Structure formats: C-alpha cells, structure tokens
Image (spheres, rainbow, N blue to C red):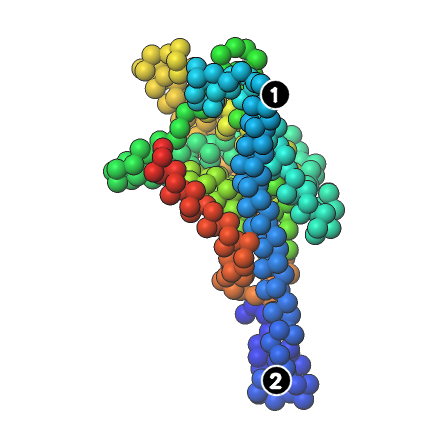
Amino acid sequence: MNGFSPYDQGGPWQNGQGGPFPSQGAYWQTPQWQEKRKIRHTTNVMGWACFAVQALMSGLALLLVQFLYLIGYPFSMEWTASSGMSPTTYYLLISLVYIIAVALPFILCMLFMRLPVNQALPFEKVGVGTGILCIFMGVGACMFSNIPSNIVAMFFEGAGFSGTMPESVQGDNALSMALSVIQIAIIPALVEELAFRGVILSQLRRFGNGLAVFGSALLFAFYHGNFLQFTFTFLVGLVLGFIMIRTNNLWITVIIHAVNNGISVLFSMVSSYLSEEAYTALNSILFVGLMLLGVVSLVILLIKKREFFQTNYNAPMLLPLSTRLMAFITNPGFVAFFALFFLSSVESLLTW
C-alpha cells in the first residue's frame, strides 16, 4: 500500500489517541497533500515554461523579420519557402531564435526553482562501451518509432488530410546547407535535451522515475505541436527518458537526438540527386540496418549489463502512480500547454 493507512496508529489521520476512526485534522496538513502540491507546482512551472517557448519563438521571429524590413533587407519572391529570405539568412535567423526561445525559459526555471546546475543538467561519467550501446539502442528505437508514426499518418490520409509534414527550406550553397544541418540536427538536439531530459526530467524524478519518464515524454510530444509527430515524439521521449534515468548523462541523449535529426537532413539533401528507386533503397537499408543495430545493442546490454534494466527500489512514494499522474495534469501550466498543442495541431491539419 502506498502512503499511510487511515487506521494506522499515530498516522497522519489520527488525533494522537489511537482508535479506529480518522482524525478531524485537515487533509491539506498531511504529507500526501503536500506531495500533490509539489507535483502540481513543479508541472505548473514546467508547463508555463514550455508555453513560453512557443510564444517566444513566434514573437522573436516576428521582431527579427520586422528589423530586417527596417534596415532594408532585400526580400525576394524567389525564396517563398523561407518567407522571402535567402536560405543562409533564414537558417541564421531561425537558429538564433530557437536557441533563445528554448533556453531562456528553462534558465529562468532553474533560477526560479533554485536548481543546482549539476542536478538539472547531469553529465555523469559513463563507460565508453555502455555509452555506445545506449546510442545504438536509442537510434534503433527512433527508427522503430517511425512505424506507428507512419500508421497514424496513413490514418490522417484516410480521413482526408495530407498526412505529410511540410518540406524544410533547401540550401542554395555550401554555407546554407551547413547551417541547415546545424539548425535541424544539432541545435534542437542540444537545447531540447537540456530542457526535457535535463531540467524537466530531473525535477520530476523527485516523484518517481516512472512519472518522470512519462511526464517528460508527454510534454516533449506536446511541444512539437502537431498530431502527425505526436506518436513518434512520445515514443522517442520514453526511450530517451529511460536512457537518461539509467545513465544520468545528457550527452548520450543529445547524440541520439542529433543522429535521428541528422538522418532526416541527409535524406532531404540527397532526395533531389537520387532516383526514386535509389532513394527508396537507401531509405530501407538505413532504416532496417539501424533497427537491427539497435536490437543487437539491446541484447548485448541485456546480457552484459543486466543491472541496466533492473528496477531501482527507491523509497516508497507517498502517493500511488494514478494520483501522481492526476496531480501532474491538473494544474494551469499543463492545461494551458495542452490547449496550445491541441489548437496548433488542428491548425496544422487544416493548412499542411
């Protein structure tokens, strides 16, 4: 049983004299109530931080575009995909906006909640072999997560929606192509992992590893703002959260995230140079190969590092998981962020 029985002698429900009847004391004075308040407070702060990220992205992008207008930047209709900006300018602008918009709210979270940097952003030492196996396992899991994600896309296609994501801006020179790799593969991997597997997951771990992995994955999926990516990002978030719990090293999840995004950039770049048959063959070989490599890495970890998958028996939680989950979702920050995700997802279905 989690927490205290209402009939335990001397428990929080007792009046100090024992007996079979609950105390007349207020429920909000019990440790259970205080625990729920802490979960709601933590999720509320993290939910509003995620909400602020989206607001900052839109606001900063608008301000910078207006600034370019004021200084006479030569917008061109030749670059409609990048709103009239050259690909080089577009990727520089987006990179700057993305770093500020994601990093600033979570830096403020760390200051507001007085989080030590080494607690919010852990980089504990991990053996080279274990780290490599975790990376291969994580990348393989990312490839596998495409399968249910594609099923969801097919469902939306059957319902009359496109079921496809909009194409990214294509670079027109070596510099813009390099910037696209940095902006799509490296920057999101760094700032998103620092936010979701760093600050958010580390704070939720106080309420149990299960809640921390599930909660951080759910917020990560909401963060991407569309139904098409929800399944993929939620499953990937679960895998990255598990690996983070077991290794306590953000670099491993950053690398997995960067490799996954980098594969998308690679296929986007080579698609115009390959025939449809060659493109499909390359896609299949890489997809199946990375999944098999992930399975092999998983098996090796199961054999050589069996403790990696063993449950950590921490101190028992005051509240059952269902109560902690209810506290996680019943606060203004979570509700506001979910509403933003839902509205953004509906809008993307109507416009993509």
Quarter of the image with the C terminus is top left
* Left or right, residue 55 beside residue 161: right
Q: Residues within 10 Å of mark 2 (few under 14, many from 20)?
A: some
Using the rendered image of the protein, determine whether residue 100 is visible from the camera's viewpoint. Answer: yes
Relative to 336, is 153 above or below? above
Residue drawn at x 56%, y 50% is 47
For disc 1, the marked residue is 71
Q: Residues within 10 Å of mark 1 (few under 14, many from 20)?
A: few
Q: Quadrant of residue 251?
A: top right
Which label's residue is closer to the chain start, 1 or 2? 2
Q: Position of residue 332 (x, y in %)?
A: 54, 57
Relative to 267, is 104 above or below? below
Residue drawn at x 58%, y 54% is 43
Using the rendered image of the protein, determine whether residue 193 is visible from the camera's viewpoint. Answer: no
Mark 1 and mark 2 residues within 8 Å of each other at the beta carbon:
no
Q: Element type at marker 2?
A: loop
Q: Position of residue 52 (x, y in %)?
A: 58, 44
Q: Of the numbered discs in the image, which one, if any, rests on residue 23?
A: 2
Relative depth, front residue between 226 and 346: 346
Q: Element type at marker 1?
A: loop
Quarter of the image with the N terminus is bottom right
- The CA span between labels 1 and 2 is 71 Å
